[in-house]
Image (cartoon, rainbow, N blue to C red):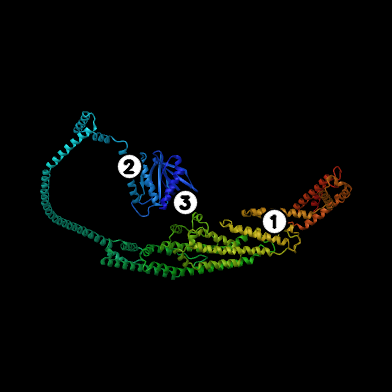
């Protein structure tokens, strides 16, 4: 009751506030929400009538007031209503509904959500009524209505139709109703005579009312008397009619008895006919079932039929004979097809079918045992056979043996697909892994012993012939590299390069065999790449065998170690088998890397390049090798980083030179040779980022800090500016010659530092050669700044008079200035080394600095002592000539 009162009040308020102003009558309002409104704001859709036209409005409530929104639609344009409910169901009617309008050639759809189902149904019913009542529009289409709403709409349509009929009855009459009225008002002949008689009486009695009433009363009495006599005369007729009715009822009873009797007879005949029809139907059904059974039995016999010749081949055929193997495989294929065939419904449980299937299943297991036993013998014999030892650093190849076994791949695949209990395929794979794993371990142990011996021999030979074999930058003196040094270092790395390529070749050959023979690969792209490519082993001083290689396009598609993390980190069956076959490879390669690192830390430079190059080749085709070599890269990267840190420590531990004039420090000069060696290794590498990072560490944390430490060391006999000046100059020249792109920005910073230290050194060494003049003008400047004396008035002060100025300038004749500059030149000459040729550049900077001071003094004289004609005993030309004479004399 409260909700209805609230609805009534809402309707009243809306009518008064919103619709009265436009002379409209509100029919029904309902609260709704827009389906696409995330804030779920409630609005009201109102159905109103104005001048026999229906409209739909959206009303928004602001606090306690309501106002129309610009959105309004005419019922003339309404074409379709979608109720969002499943057709013909009563379960959970939807709250959503769509109104679809059409204006000209455009259709507009508006989605709304009602708060209750009753509000939605009431609104749609009123909308349907108004659409039928006002206007002659196209019929309204309804979709998505539940049964309740359909019933309500049907009743509404009926009410509208009845309302129109009543309107037609009480409104403008049709042609038919007018004719009926005219027929009803027509006067009969008797009535016409009575009316004329009444009128005649009225004229006769001269319109006397009482006489007229008496006359009429008398005539009425006569008429009633006549009617009574007529009624009495019809009594006999009524008795005759009743008698005839009784006779008719008796005849009907007799007829009903006959009909009942006949009906019983007809029922017996119908029952017999029905029984005959059922019997005929059963016979037809039985006949059809017999035919279908015969057909299904034929299918079963044809499906389960297995020729005796096939049975004999599978039981006694020589599996190892290549000529008979195709027939055996054909028989096995037929057997598997029979066991997998689907039979008609019900035959799977027939005893004969069960027996035949059991027999065929036993035959399948027997044949599988024969295949597994023969292949197990082959694997065992090959693993125990004595293989010929190979000369040089190469791993034995098993390609020929694998190629001979490929013909048994269809049999192994048949075993994998058709026999799961017992797990013959898994047992065969495990046997292969164990037998071939032992063979690979023996071969790899022998191979890696050779590689390790060659590594140790090469390391000892190189260390015995070189002063600084590991090329420490902090060595006490510069160590230059020759062309033979580059060759020696590459030869030192050749064994490990061959080892990595040989292992990769063997693993890829084995992977190709496993993919084709055991069908282990689940990656078609991987299988294609492995089976159709080869890894190139580069030419070297040691004999090598050709192996699998990877195409350039595949290398470009997967250039990095971590580009395919899911493939590298997922243990597929293929990856697990390879890990079991080559489980000692990681340790053996790690031992060789450790031996190289222990013999000569410098080899980590080239070792990182070698492993990265081969990793890029094997990564796209072999996840196992990618993971194995990836761990090697991490190990070598750690060794490389450790070597760089030790290089930094060697720089920081470098001794301070004992010479007075030692020039560029050895570790600065050694950096150039180290960089040339590194660039030779990384010339075509795709992972230069490691080397560029090492360069930055060596320069920033090593060379910069080392120069700074020595420059400020207590035992250093040179000014710090000289140490910075000469070493930054040499380092800038080194980077200019190397032309390393990653160090260009650092070279610019070094150049700026060099210029800064050179300027600082010039200012410190030159100082103030005209010291008394500088002291004099410092006093002048102080007087002007503190006492407020103007520049041209300073000469009137006794301590800054013209006489005092002439006295100070007289202290520096040309000869005195030249002598002081000669002493300065000798001092600078003792500090700067000849290697960097910095003396002339520094001397030119001192000359320029001296001239700048001279010009500054001259400007002060002109400003403070105008028109005094006081000048130095020498001019700028004299200064230039003095500097030139001093430089020429030395």
Q: Name the mark on residue 390.
A: none
Which of the 4 image quadrants contains residue 482? bottom right
Q: Are marks 2 and 1 in contact (CB under 8 Å)?
A: no
> Percent x, y for residue 594?
57, 67
> Percent x, y for residue 149?
35, 49
Q: Nearer the viewer, mark 2 or mark 1?
A: 2
Q: Are marks 3 and 2 in contact (CB under 8 Å)?
A: no
| Disc 2 target residue | 163
Could you tell whether 165 is left or right of 270 in the image? right
Q: Nearer the viewer, residue 406 or 743?
A: 743
* Chain-order first, disc 3 or disc 2: 3
> Percent x, y for residue 449?
53, 69
- Sort mark 2 into few (<14), some (14-19) or many (20+) by Cα contacts within 10 Å: few
* Chain-order first, disc 2 or disc 1: 2
Which of the 4 image quadrants contains residue 469? bottom right
- Secondary structure at numbered mark 2: helix
Image height of 526 relative to 102, above or below: below
> Percent x, y for residue 538?
53, 59
- Secondary structure at numbered mark 3: loop
Asked if one can make out residue 837 in the rendered structure from this viewpoint, the answer is: no
* Chain-order first, disc 3 or disc 1: 3
| Disc 3 target residue | 40
Image height of 232 relative to 370, above or below: above
| Disc 1 target residue | 730
Could you tell whether 844 is left or right of 15 in the image? right
- Sort mark 1 into few (<14), some (14-19) or many (20+) by Cα contacts within 10 Å: many
Residue at 40% over, 67% down = 426
Residue at 76% over, 51% down = 845
Asked if one can make out residue 85 in the rendered structure from this viewpoint, the answer is: yes
Q: CA distance from mark 3 to mark 2?
A: 40 Å
Q: Nearer the viewer, residue 356 or 79?
A: 79
Which of the 4 image quadrants contains residue 497? bottom right
């Amino acid at each position: 009751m409260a909700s209805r009162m609230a609805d009534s009040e809402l309707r009243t308020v809306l009518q008064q506030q919103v619709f009265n102003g436009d002379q409209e009558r509100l029919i029904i309002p309902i609260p709704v929400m827009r389906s696409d409104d995330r804030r779920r704001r409630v609005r009201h859709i109102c159905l109103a009538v104005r001048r026999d036209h229906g409209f739909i409005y959206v009303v928004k409530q602001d606090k306690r007031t309501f106002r129309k929104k610009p959105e309004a639609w005419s019922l003339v344009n309404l074409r379709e209503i979608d109720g969002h409910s499943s057709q013909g169901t009563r379960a959970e009617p939807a709250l959503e509904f769509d109104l679809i309008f059409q204006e000209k050639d455009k259709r507009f759809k508006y989605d709304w959500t009602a708060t209750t189902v009753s509000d939605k149904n009431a609104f749609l019913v009123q909308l349907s009524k108004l659409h039928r009542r006002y206007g002659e529009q196209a019929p309204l289409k309804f979709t998505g209505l539940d049964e309740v709403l359909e019933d309500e709409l049907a009743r509404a349509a009926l009410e509208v139709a009845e309302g129109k009929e009543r309107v037609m009855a009480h409104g403008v009459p049709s042609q038919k109703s007018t004719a009926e009225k005219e027929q009803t008002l027509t006067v009969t002949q008797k009535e016409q005579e009575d009316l004329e008689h009444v009128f005649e009486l009225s004229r006769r009695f001269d319109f006397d009312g009482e006489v007229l009433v008496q006359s009429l009363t008398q005539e009425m009495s006569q008429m009633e008397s006549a009617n009574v006599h007529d009624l009495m005369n019809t009594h006999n007729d009524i008795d005759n009619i009743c008698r005839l009715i009784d006779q008719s009822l008796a005849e009907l009873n007799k007829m009903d008895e006959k009909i009942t009797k006949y009906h019983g007879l007809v029922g017996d005949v119908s029952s017999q006919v029905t029984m005959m029809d059922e019997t005929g139907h059963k016979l037809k059904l039985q006949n059809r079932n017999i035919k279908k059974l015969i057909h299904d039995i034929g299918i079963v016999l044809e499906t389960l039929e297995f020729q005796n010749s096939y049975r004999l081949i599978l039981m006694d055929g020589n599996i190892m004979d290549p000529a008979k193997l195709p027939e055996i495989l054909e028989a096995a294929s037929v057997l598997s097809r029979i066991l997998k065939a689907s039979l008609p419904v019900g035959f799977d449980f027939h005893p004969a079918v069960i027996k035949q299937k059991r027999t065929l299943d036993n035959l399948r297991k027997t044949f599988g045992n024969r295949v597994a036993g023969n292949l197990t013998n082959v694997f065992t014999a090959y693993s125990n056979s004595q293989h010929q030892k190979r000369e040089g650093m190469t791993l034995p190849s098993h390609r020929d043996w694998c190629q001979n076994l490929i013909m048994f791949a269809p049999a192994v695949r048949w075993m994998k697909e058709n026999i799961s209990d017992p797990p013959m395929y898994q047992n065969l794979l495990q046997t292969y892994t164990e037998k071939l794993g032992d063979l690979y371990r023996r071969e790899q142990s022998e191979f890696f012993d050779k590689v390790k011996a060659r590594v140790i021999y090469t390391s000892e030979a190189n260390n015995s012939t070189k002063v600084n074999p590991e090329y420490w930058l902090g060595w006490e003196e510069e160590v230059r590299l020759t062309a033979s040094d580059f060759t020696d270092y590459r030869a030192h790395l050749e064994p490990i390069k061959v080892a990595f390529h040989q292992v990769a070749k063997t693993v890829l050959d084995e992977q190709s065999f496993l993919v084709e023979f055991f069908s282990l690969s689940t990656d078609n792209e991987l299988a294609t790449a492995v089976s159709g490519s080869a890894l190139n082993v580069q030419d070297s001083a040691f004999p090598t065998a050709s192996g699998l290689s990877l195409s350039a396009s595949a290398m470009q598609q997967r250039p990095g170690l971590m580009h395919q993390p899911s493939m590298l980190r997922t243990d597929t069956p293929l990856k697990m088998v390879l890990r079991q076959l080559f489980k000692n490879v990681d340790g053996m390669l790690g031992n060789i890397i450790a031996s190289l690192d222990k013999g000569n830390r410098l080899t980590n430079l080239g070792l990182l390049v070698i492993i990265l190059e081969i990793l890029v080749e094997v990564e796209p085709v072999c996840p196992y090798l990618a993971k194995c070599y990836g761990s090697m890269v991490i190990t070598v990267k750690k060794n490389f980083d450790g070597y760089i840190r030790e290089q930094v420590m060697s720089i920081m531990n470098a001794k301070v030179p004992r010479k007075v004039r030692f020039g560029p420090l050895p570790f600065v000069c050694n950096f150039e040779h180290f960089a040339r060696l590194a660039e030779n290794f990384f010339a075509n590498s795709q992972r230069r980022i490691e080397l560029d990072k090492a360069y930055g560490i060596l320069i920033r944390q090593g060379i910069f800090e080392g120069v700074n430490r020595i420059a400020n060391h207590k035992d250093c006999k040179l000014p710090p500016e000289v140490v910075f000046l000469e070493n930054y100059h040499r380092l800038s020249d080194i980077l200019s010659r190397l032309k390393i792109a990653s160090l260009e920005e650092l070279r610019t910073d070094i150049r700026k530092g060099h210029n800064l230290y050179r300027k600082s050194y010039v200012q410190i060494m030159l100082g103030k050669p005209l010291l008394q003049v500088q002291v004099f003008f410092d006093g002048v400047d102080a007087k002007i700044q503190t006492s407020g004396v103007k520049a041209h008035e300073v000469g009137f002060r006794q301590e800054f008079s013209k006489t005092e100025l002439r006295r100070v300038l007289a202290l520096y004749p040309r000869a005195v200035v030249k002598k002081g500059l000669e002493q300065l030149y000798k001092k600078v000459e003792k500090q700067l080394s000849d290697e960097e040729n910095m003396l002339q550049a520094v001397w030119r900077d001192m000359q320029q600095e001296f001239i700048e001071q001279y010009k500054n003094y001259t400007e002060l004289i002109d400003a403070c002592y105008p028109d005094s004609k006081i000048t130095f005993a020498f001019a700028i030309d004299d200064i230039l000539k003095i500097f030139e004479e001093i430089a020429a004399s030395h």
